[in-house]
Image: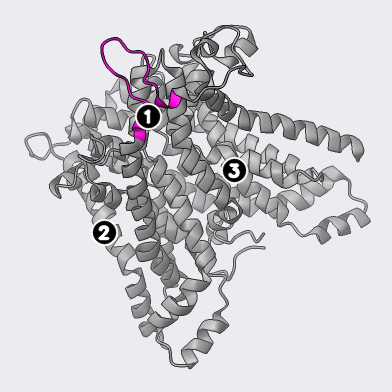
Amino acid sequence: MKKIDVLLLALLIIFSIISLFPIYWIVITALKVNSEIFTTPPVFFPTKITLSNFYTPGERFGEVAQTAFGSFPWMINSAVVAVLSSLIGTFFIGAPAAYALTRYLKNVWLARTVLFMMMIPEAALVIPFYVMIMRMNLINTWWGLILVYLSFIAPLSTWLLMGFFSEIPRSVEEAASIDGLSAYKIFFRISLPMAMPGIIVSIIVNFINAWNEFLYALVLTYTPFPTGSQTVPLFLTDFIVIEKTFAWGGLAAAGVIVMIPSIIIGLYAQKYLVKGWTMGAVKE
Amino acid sequence: MNRRQATKIGLVFAAPLLIYFFVFFIYPIFLLFKYSFTNSYGAFSLNNFASMISDPILSYSLINTLYYYVGSVAIQFTGGFLAAIVLNSYSGRLKSVFRLILYVPLTVSPIVIALMWLIIFNPTYGPLDYILRSPINWFGSTALAMPTIIVANGWEYVPFVFLIIYAGLQAVPRQYYEAASIDGMNRWQMFRYITLPSIRPIMLIAFLLNSIGILQGFTLVYVLTNGGPGFSTYILSFYIYKVAFSYFNLHYASALSLLFIAIIGAFVYAVLKLTSVEKYLGLRRETEGGYG
């Protein structure tokens, strides 16, 4: 018994190193001075810590390069689009649909439709979306991105919430119904508040997905706030393309800034996530 | 309340989803059909499908997609399964801390992951080649570029499989093991006859969701290799993007999109038919509260 615990602990430590090392490396690269970034052997434990990578532009010939703090206009777009699309997708689409599917519509084809929406890859829809958003005159706008982001938020939010709604005891709703509340009032006053943990999971998961989304933003946006709706992954992409070979400090700093919101929010959501993903098929 | 009334109320609740589905799924797929079956002058044409047959880049992309998919599933499933089993068997005090640590990569943006591995895999200043004591140009080699992408992507999604399977393991009732140990089963027998059958549903769910997630892959290829070197990391999603937005051939790209949807549709359909995952997900018949 003792021996096996030591082995397990050793394995867990190895897994943890694999899990954390890349994050550690990008964080220390962001905090290193240039002389410790570009050396062989690489410096695993920096002796000097600096924050200058966050605000000093990389040394480019002739033009001023971007800095990590320069990502602010892109951050605004990301925040607005991710917040609005996850809220709209959860409250207006996912929650009522999940409620309908667990209470009123026993038709399996509707549940299959949700799975169908989830499985279609972004790349397969990007062409018609591009055409549609162009026709609606919404290219490079918040609403253009939000409308398109709902294509992955709406089905996922429905999927996640079905597990939560199916666990709310029917007796409460039945009692309310006997008291004369209409189906709609029961949903808004009783079922929705009781499914609040699920609502929070859905908002968080979809916020992270929208925050990280790349392909649609690449195709549908081209300038940062205030002239356009380009999001922060695109900021990072341009940064990578331009600075790939020499401004690693600034690059890593930008990466850290983009990484922080989703890690914090993700850690907070951790305990609810599994239940949502497995549609309540596992009870913790 | 009768059945018709219930359906009516249900449809009102489901209306936003259904409207969205028709406008942003059915109509786009209709557009894909329309573009696929016309040429750039708008006339009916089957050329887009005919040219698929003789398109070498499409064959590369399909083979690479298969390679990418099989490699990713192998890494992510083995890794996630192993980590879940190890953590579940471990009875120390740091259990929840380890769970949190092993989960973190899942929250990192793909674009940051691209950046991260760009630095780590760098042959001159990166830590990995120093540890391996040999400068290898990971992204510059046709043989290594794809495995490198698979590993980089795996780092993010192993935690997904881990998290789900671990939850499944935690949900196996303790009494089963107690009864088994009274019956004199050893550890392997317990694993084989109690653990595995108990987590089968959850493994199927993890497999299905994981597969769908892998086939969504695009960002890492776009940022890390841009399909290269040569065509060695062209996967279908990337090729569609290229045809549409670099070669501006919306018609051919639409036909490729339909092909992509058909492939994934066939795959998901096969998984649903061949396994019992539909039942566990409540897609086949109503199961109150699900399994467990």
Give the distance between the C-alpha atoms of the residues marked 2 and 1, in whole angstroms.
Answer: 34 Å
Please name whichever residue, A220 or B225, is drawn nearer the observer in this view of the structure: A220
Residue carrying label 2? B22
What residue is rendered at 65% in x and 61% in y? A283
Element at label 3? helix
Please name whichever residue, B197 or A156, is drawn nearer the observer in this view of the structure: A156
Question: Tag 2: residue type?
Answer: Phe
Magenta-drawn segment: A53-71
The chain letter under disc 3 is B
Please name whichever residue, B20 or B235, is drawn nearer the observer in this view of the structure: B20
Residue carrying label 1? A236
Element at label 2? helix
Residue B284 seen in the figure:
no
Q: Quadrant of residue B198?
A: bottom right
Q: Residue B254: say if magenta.
A: no
Of the 4 image quadrants, the one containing the N terminus of chain B is: bottom left
